[in-house]
Image (cartoon, coloured by chain):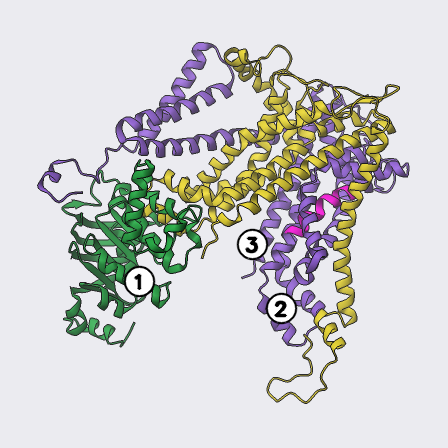
Amino acid sequence: MSHAAIADKRPSTLRGASLPKWTPWAIAAGSVALGLGISAAAGLDSKIQWALMAGVLFVTGTYVVAARVEGRRQAKDRVATSFVWVAFLLAVIPLLSLVWATVQRGTKVLDVYFLTHSMGVVADSEAGGGIYHAIIGSLEQVGLATVIGAPIGVLTAIYLVEYGRGNLARAVTFFVDVMTGIPSIVAGLFILSLMLMWDMQPFGFAGSLALAILMMPVVVRSTEEMLKLVPNELREASLALGVPKWRTILKVVLPTSIGGITTGIMLAIARIAGETAPVLLLVFGNPFINNDPFEGAQASLPLFIYQQYSQSAGSTAAYDRAWAASLTLIAFVMILNLAARGIARWKAPR
Amino acid sequence: MDITTQKTDEAPPPTPLPTPVEQKRAARGATRPGDRIFLGLSRGSGILLLAVMAAIAIFLTYRASLAISKDEANFLTTFEWNTGLVPPKFGIAVLAFGTVVSSVIAMVLAVPIAVAIALFLTHYAPRRTSGPIAYVIDLLAAVPSIVYGLWGALVLVPHLDGLFGWLDDYLGWTGVFSWEEGAPRSMLTVGILLAIMILPIITNVSREVFRQVPRMHEEAALALGATRWEVVRMSVLPFGRSGVISASMLGLGRALGETMAVATVLSPDFDIHASLLNPGGGTFAQNIASKFSEATEFGRDALIASGLVLFVITLLVNGAARWIIARRKEYSGANA
Amino acid sequence: MAKRIDVSGLTAYYGSHKAIEDISMTIEPRSVTAFIGPSGCGKSTFLRTLNRMHEVTPGGRVEGKVLLDDEDLYGHGIDPVSVRREVGMVFQRPNPFPTMSIFDNVAAGLRLNGKYKKSELSDVVEKSLKGANLWNEVKDRLNKPGSGLSGGQQQRLCVARAIAVEPDVLLMDEPCSALDPISTLAIEDLIGELKERFTIVIVTHNMQQAARVSDRTAFFNLAAVGQPGKLIEIDETERIFSNPSVQATEDYISGRFG
């Protein structure tokens, strides 16, 4: 700092004592070993505990070592770094476990027979049977929900972006936000209250209506985002050619943003395909194949998983079916997701 | 709007001035049948959406009032759910408590970890690995809640015995962490599972926000001699605060209304327990799912009444989130 | 306070792309050194190697030596964080911390170094804001967000923030390019005052500005797009603008290219 001669004898201000590069790894290895050691010594058997202990040891160990050698600021920096790493690793474990369990246990009974047969003649506690009826139910309910929800959602978004001014638009924007936060079971209860009014029995289309309610705000939001990305110059260029507004929207705005809109709709489908609560209330579940969504109880994949789990009193065969159905459902949702992302990348505006 | 008659390379032919009425119509852009139909359709969809919201509120309130008017006990404070009794007695105190407690546990566990992961992905991880990891976490956000529920019941619960015993040994004296009997299917289990479920969502939104922190803010801190953590604290976290709050509220909304994951891992009863480790308690959504199949029409109305309360709570949470974000706009970081 | 910078054989990369090649120069303490040259010639990159900000960009790395009073900034065991504390920087676009008040912006660097006493901080904040010719304009609203100031005021706030930690060197990367002429003048006046206390290095696109504010001027050029930038010459500003020793410098200054 000072240019006096004494300054040269003081240690450099640029040169902080620093730990060698391998330090974090050494501390990590030490913490894991110590965590395992303590767990073994204390007779703890859960994997969760030693992992937690190793994590805590790692963070505190890093702080102590770094504070000794490098000073407090560096120590804080290192603690933040180690905490961020530990948090990441801790969070990854359950998520990996989820994927692993579903794939490993799901593949046990998942085969063509499983996909093409119903539970009609199989008791919940016995082995055998399949999810054909649930797949039919899911496809019909989700399909009908999409037929209702997607156009209304897209049209509402068009209204908000292309026409929306004034109180009505503001109200719609606000209530779309509110609707996004509706728990799925509340949407189910709403349709249920209608069914109670007119004394109706459960049927597939009732579930579709609840799913459509859950789908609409998601579609509105994503479509809105996409329409806003269309540059105004494009609209003006078309209008300036004398093209009426509705044709401008149909021929210029929508084609430009169709990739993003499709992506949004597919993600919304993926979301409602996994919804269980409204289906439980409104469609009720049915071990037999029912191809008519407008008459009589139906099954659906998520509901099948729940009922196999909850109504089988611990039967392994039922659990196996639940895992296999989970794997099928996840595969369906993931394919939709990946396809949606593919479309988004492929059709990305410039 | 309508300039079809004009040609760009010639002087426009003298046309009669439009009357005020015509001008007004043209400005609205709805003179043509096509325009009118299209505007009608899109505005109609918006109105339909509003109508659905109104219908939800009206019908839920109506059915709920049918049940509550016959309730012999205090609907808000009773620890009981006996809709079959004559006269019926039921109240939501236990459900409200359980819903709030499990969601709070989930938030306390998930938010710091989600923020840490988001920081990990944007500021700590090597760039080549952070992309794929972010992608996978994005996909995990799409895993249906029933799958989390199945995993929670069959994989997570058996692994929690050790942790619960350990908490009981060292923190049991607090009462909150004492564990007496039963499988670990308690409020804490629910909280942990909900935390795992909402983690991907909060992480994703937070990551987006952190990624948008302008480089120049980070460089300002770096140039002052800030360590990486200090850069995060000075530029990244303040800039991302409102985004993290709205991400957390999104997660909270999900946790409050989550049905299946709670219904699969909790052993419910209708009581409030001081300990988070002992099984028991319940949440609004779980209670509806578990009681629904055996409920009479009156019982269903009572469940609708509890659903209405859940609806109001989620509305309040969403409103609070929007208010917080609006209040922090002035510090949003969108300067110059 | 002010320190001399000795650069020898410095080459900087972005990934595999070589941005500047083999630059050597001496920057005198308590003077203003200006870097000029056409876009893409690497003058900003070079500036950022002087406080190790270059390596912050993904893929950025540096070879060669930068001596700050005989100590190599790229030497073994040197902490880049400490380097940046002693070599301050002002950026092209004003970048006050948007979530902090004017006071906190100026105090930010001090707080990092563990000074928290309010009275101590207010003294330094006042001194720094005065040093940046901003005190009179903001003394009544120190608790307002810094982002509420005009562009020129924000840039002077950034200067105040940089000098509050008493660096040895102040680097300025086109500090006036986002400002209007009046604010530019204010910053230029400020540079004239600050050189009494600091070693100042300024990158500028504006040759008149270089001629006005600097004591020495370095001219950078690149052979072709995609080629690394090189130092063509460095000399007294007066000589560079009247009688440069290299033809390319004269061509650039007289506006024949660039």
Provide the residue span drawn in magenta: A208-221
Q: Nearer the viewer, mark 1 or mark 3?
A: 1
Is A319 on the left-hand or right-hand side of C2? right
* Observer-nearest of B246 and A195: B246
Residue shown at 22% from the left, 68% from the top: C211
Badge 1 local density, few (<14 within 10 Å), some, or many (20+)? Answer: some
Give me the chain letter of mark 3.
A
Give the colour of chain C: green
Is A5 on the left-hand or right-hand side of C208? left
Amino acid at pointer 3: Arg
Quadrant position of the N terminus of chain B in the picture:
bottom right
Tell me, yes or no, whether the highlighted magenta stretch contains residue A235. Answer: no
Give me the chain letter of mark 2.
A
Chain identifier, purple in the render: A
Q: Which residue is mark 2?
A: A235
Quarter-of-image position of residue B184: top right
Q: Which mark is residue C186?
A: 1
Label 2 sits on a secondary structure element that is helix
* Observer-nearest of A67 and C31: C31
Residue shown at 70% from the left, 28% from the top: A321
Quarter-of-image position of residue C121: top left
Q: Which residue is mark 3?
A: A345
Residue B323 point in image, percent of width and height = 60, 43
Query: Is the magenta region chiefly helix, strand or loop?
Result: helix
Residue shown at 54% from the left, 42% from the top: B204
Q: Nearer the viewer, mark 2 or mark 3?
A: 2
Amino acid at pointer 2: Arg
Q: CA distance from mark 1 to mark 2?
A: 44 Å
Q: Residue furthest left?
A: A5
